[in-house]
Amino acid sequence: MATTFEDQTFENQDFTQKNLEKGSYEYCKFSNCDFSNSDLSSIKFVECTFRNCNLSMAKLQQTAFMEVVFKENKLLGLRFEDCNPFGLSFRFEHCNLSHASFYNTKLQKIPFHHTQLIDVDFSECDLSAAVFEHCDLSGATFDQTNLAKANFRHAWNYRIDPERNNIKKARFSQSGISGLLSKYDIEIDRAS
């Protein structure tokens, strides 16, 4: 039977040499921990908070993230499509998710706040009603992605093909319109 850890705080720990113990972590806080290249497979995180941690390139095979908050974390190259899809939900604040992949995941209403999403793969994702608040989406891939009601008003550097993605009722700022028309190789002059 898997071990359950409740309401525990893990600070300044290095899990690069010895992986986090398998089990269920509920209402736990992880602060200044290094999980880079570690194996988090089959671990369950429920309503946990990760602050100022490095999870870059960690293995997420069947990892469960339920109502997890990531604040000021480095999450480079993570493959969220490998996670357990049941109850998958998180929020990202002031994180770097560059080169991560969310291929074919269901992330309705997911909030990204002040987050770098450079070269992230959102292909075939359900991001309906997602919020991209002050996010850099340079090189992010949107292909067959459901972006209905998503909010891009305060995001920048995105390129989204309206013919290959569902953008019904999505919100964009006037300055971001060029990101929807880039495939047409047209020039858009800003009104003066």
Image (spheres, rainbow, N blue to C red):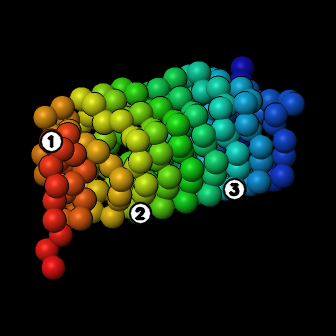
* Badge 2 element: strand
At horizontal 52% and vertical 37% (from top left) the residue drawn is: 99
Mark identifier at residue 134: 2
Question: Does residue 65 sit above or below 22 in this rendering?
Answer: below
* Badge 3 element: loop
* Badge 1 element: helix
At horizontal 65% and vertical 32% (from top left) the residue drawn is: 57
Question: Which of these two is toward me, 172 or 7?
Answer: 172
Question: Which residue position holds label 1?
Answer: 184
Question: Which residue position holds label 3?
Answer: 52
Quarter placement of the C terminus: bottom left
Q: Which is closer to the viewer, label 1 or label 2?
A: 1
Amino acid type, residue under disc 3 in the picture: Asn
- Residue 170 percent location from the top left of the image: 19, 52
Q: How far apart are marks 1 and 2 (CA)?
A: 26 Å
Assess disc 3: are there few (<14), some (14-19) or many (≥20) residues with their C-alpha within 10 Å of its C-alpha.
some
- Is the Cβ of the residue at disc 2 closer than 8 Å to that at disc 3? no
